[in-house]
Amino acid sequence: MTLEKREKLYKPALALLAVVMLLVSSGMQGKLNEVRLEKQLSRRDPLENAPPALAFTTVALGGFRGIISNILWMRATKLQMEDKYFELIQLADWITKLQPTYVDVWKFQAWNMAYNVSIKFPSEDARWHWVKSGVEILRDEAIQINPHRPGLYEELSRYFLHKIGGNSDDAHMYFKVQWGGEWHHFLGEGRPPDYDALINPTTDEEKERARRLREVYKMDPEIMKEVDEKYGPLEWRLPETHAIYWATAGIKEARYDNVINLRRHIFQSMLMAVRRGRMIENKAARTLKFGPNIHIIAKANQAYEDMMAAEPEAKFALEQGHRTFLMRAVRDLYLHNQKEEALEWFKYGKQYYADWLPGGDQDIEAFIVEYITEDLGANSQDDFKSLIISYLIQAFYYLAIGDEDQFLGFQGVAKKIWQKYYETNYQFDIERLEEKLKLPPFEELRKEAILYMFTPEAGYHPQVLEQLEFKMPGVKEIVEERKALEAARQANDEVNQVGPQPSANPAPGATNNKNGDN
C-alpha cells in the first residue's frame, strides 16, 4: 500500500475509532452515573426541580462555575473580615446560583442573615425579618434542591432551637411571639392539629390548610403526626417542636452521612419542651405564659437514655444532665399537684443515682423543699419570705385562670417552704429567739401576696383580678380592708402635715377663754 493510500485511510480510521470509543463511553456512562449517585459523588438529581434561573446558570456556565465561585468566595471572605455583611448577601446569592449543591454556601448565606445582619438592627421587627429570612432560605430553597443533605436540616433545626427558641438574642421573646402567633393563626382552633385531615383533606378549608402546610412551610403532615406520636403531645406554636420536626426529617432523608447531631437536636429540644413546652393562655385577659409540659416527661427521659446508649463516651456528662432533669421533673409534677406520679419519678431517681441529693434518705416533701430553696439560693429570712410570696402569687394566678392543680401545688409548696424555715431556724425554743428573725404567719403572707397582685406594679390584667375575687372568697374583703387602712393613713398624714389651724382674729376686747373670764 502506497503512502498516499495509507494517508487517505488514516483519517477515516481515526474517525471510526473515535466513534467506537464514544459509543463505548456512552454505554458506560449510565453505570458511572449510577455509581456516582449511589456514593453521593453527584448531585444531579436534586436539580431536576430547580428554578429556571438556577437551571440555566448551572448548564450555561458548565465547568467555569467552579472558577467563578472561587473568585466570589475570596471576595466574600474579604467582606466578612471587614464586617460588610449586607454586601455579602448578594454575593452569597450568586454563589448559591453557581454552586447549588454546595451545602456550606447555603449555610453561610442563612447564618449571615439570621445572626450577623439581624443584630445590626435595634428594632425587634427588623431583627425578626432577617432571622425568618435565614430560616426560609434553608427551608424553601436549600433543602428543596438538596433534600438528602442532613447538614441543612441540622442547621435549620438549630435556628429553631437556638436562635428562636433560645435566649441568646435580646429580642428572643419577640421571635417566639411572632412564630407562635403565625402558627396560632395557621392552626386555628385545631390544637393539637387534626393530622388525618392534613394528610387526607376533604373540605375546602382542610385542603387549603394542607396546601399551605406543604407549599408555604414545606412540611409533611405524616412526619408531623409521627413526631407527635413519638415525642408528644407537642405544642406546634413553639419553636422547639419545629426543631424536632426538621431534625427528624433530616434523619429520614440522610443516606450515608452521620446523623448524630440531628439526634442531639431532638434530645435537646425535648428537654426544652419539658421545661417550657406548654402555652398557658388566659383568653379573658388575652395574656400568654410558658410552663412545663409534664405530659412528655417519660418520653424526654427515654430520649436521655437513648442518647446515653448511643454516645457511651459522653455518658458521664449526660448523666449529670439526666440527674438535673429528673429533679426538675419531680418538682414540676409536685407543683402541678400530680403527687403520685412525682413520687414514682422520685423513687426512680433515687434508684438511678446514689447521690440523689446531699442530706441522706429524704422523703419526697423534704426533697422538694430542699431542692427549691437550694436551687434559688434561699438562705436569709428575706430570701424565704420572697420565695414564699412568689410561689403564692403563682398559685393565685393559676387559680384565677382555672388551673386548680397548679394552684394547689404551688400553695402547698409555699406552705412547706414556710415550715422549713421554722424547722431550720427554730428547732430549739422558739420563744427565746429574737422577734425580728421570725417570719410572719403563713396567712399573713397569703394576704401580702394577694395585695401585691392588686397593685399597679404587679401588672395583672383587671379580668385576672376579677376572676381571682370570684374564685377565692375573702379576697375582696382583704383588698377593701387594705384600701380603707391606706385611706385612713393618708388622711392622718395630711392632718399632721398641715398642723392646727389658727383661730380668726378676735374682736377688740374679746378673749379666747371659753368661760369668758379675763
Image (cartoon, grey):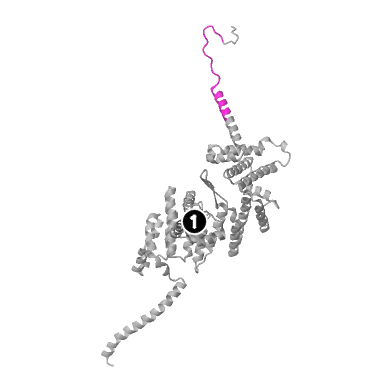
Q: Quadrant of the C terminus?
A: top right
Q: Residue at x 59, y 11 (%)?
A: 514
Closer to the camera, 337 or 40? 337
SS of the residue under disc 1: helix
Is 479 left or right of 27, judged from the image as shown? right
View extreme (front): residue: 203
**Can residue 459 be seen by looking at this rendering?**
no
Q: Residue at x 44, y 63 (%)?
A: 143
Q: What amino acid type should be assigned to the residue bearing mark 1?
A: Phe
Q: Quadrant of the N terminus?
A: bottom left
Is 123 left or right of 482, judged from the image as shown? left
Magenta stretch, residue numbers: 486-511
**Can residue 94 be seen by looking at this rendering?**
yes
What crowding class fits label 1: few (fewer than 14 Cα within 10 Å), some (14-19), or many (20 or more)? many
Is 26 left or right of 243, judged from the image as shown? left
View extreme (left): residue: 4
In percent of width and height, residue 199 lies at: 49, 61
Q: Residue at x 57, y 25 (%)?
A: 492
Closer to the camera, 387 or 337? 337
Closer to the camera, 476 or 133? 476
Q: Quadrant of residue 348?
A: bottom right
Q: Quadrant of residue 81?
A: bottom left
In percent of width and height, residue 254 lies at: 49, 66
Q: Which residue does the numbered mark 1 point to in the structure image? A: 160
In percent of width and height, residue 358 lies at: 67, 52
The number of numbered discs placed on residues in the rendered structure image is 1
View extreme (right): residue: 429
Residue 468 in magenta stretch: no
Residue 503 in magenta stretch: yes
